[in-house]
């Protein structure tokens, strides 16, 4: 059960964030075996005063086209699968939406299964 948060600077295309989300979900399905219908996303666009980042941290040249993706998911996937996920997301966004590879910032947050409640006040995985 991944929970995905995608943050971008305000974009002239009102469908842009949703299109990013669709590509991220597709990458999760293929790279880390996320099941069908397990798609929960929060998409946010920010003005320049509320979207702050370093343009050259670690020698990577970032632009205002930066896409910040945070995925919270159950722990346990291999490093290889995580690397495949990062690469698949970046390549999909680049190929389909023209997002520069340097502008794809991904953060995974792993949690134990008992840290989820999908509704009704019940910890379904505990």
Image: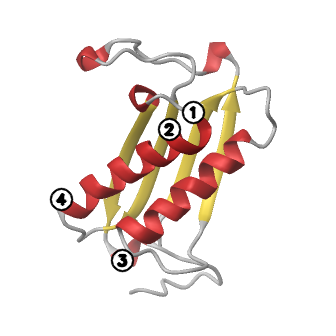
How far, Cα to Cα, is label 3 from label 4? 19 Å
Question: Dot 2: few (<14), some (14–19), or many (≥20) neighbours within 10 Å?
Answer: some
Query: Which residue is at a point 52% across and 17% down the rendered structure image?
Result: 52
Please give the residue where the numbered disc 3 appears in the rendered image. Answer: 113
Classify mark 4: residues with Cα within 10 Å, few (<14), some (14-19) or many (20+).
few
Of the numbered discs 2 and 4, the one sitting upstream in the chain is: 4
Q: Are marks 1 and 2 in contact (CB under 8 Å)?
A: yes
Corner quadrant of residue 119: bottom right
Q: Of the two numbered discs 4 and 1 on the same chain, state the one appearing first in sequence.
A: 4
Going from N to C along the chain, the mark reached first, 3 or 2, is 2
- The circle drawn on residue 98 is 1
C-alpha span from label 3 to label 2: 32 Å
In the image, residue 9 above or below residue 14: above
Determine crowd level at label 1: few under 14, some 14-19, many 20+ residues with C-alpha closer than 10 A: few
Dot 3 lies on which element?
Answer: helix
Near-viewer residue (69 or 90):
90
């Amino acid at each position: 059960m991944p929970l995905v948060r995608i943050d971008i600077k305000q974009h002239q295309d009102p469908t842009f964030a949703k299109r990013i989300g669709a590509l991220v979900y597709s990458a999760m399905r293929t790279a880390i075996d996320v099941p069908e219908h397990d798609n929960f996303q929060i998409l946010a666009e920010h003005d320049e005063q509320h979207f702050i980042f370093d343009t050259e941290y670690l020698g990577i040249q970032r632009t205002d086209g930066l896409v910040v993706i945070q995925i919270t998911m159950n722990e346990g996937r291999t490093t290889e699968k995580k690397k495949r996920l990062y690469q698949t997301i970046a390549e999909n966004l680049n190929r389909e939406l023209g997002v520069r590879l340097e502008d794809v910032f991904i953060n995974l947050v792993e949690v134990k299964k008992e840290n989820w409640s999908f509704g009704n006040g019940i910890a379904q995985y505990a």
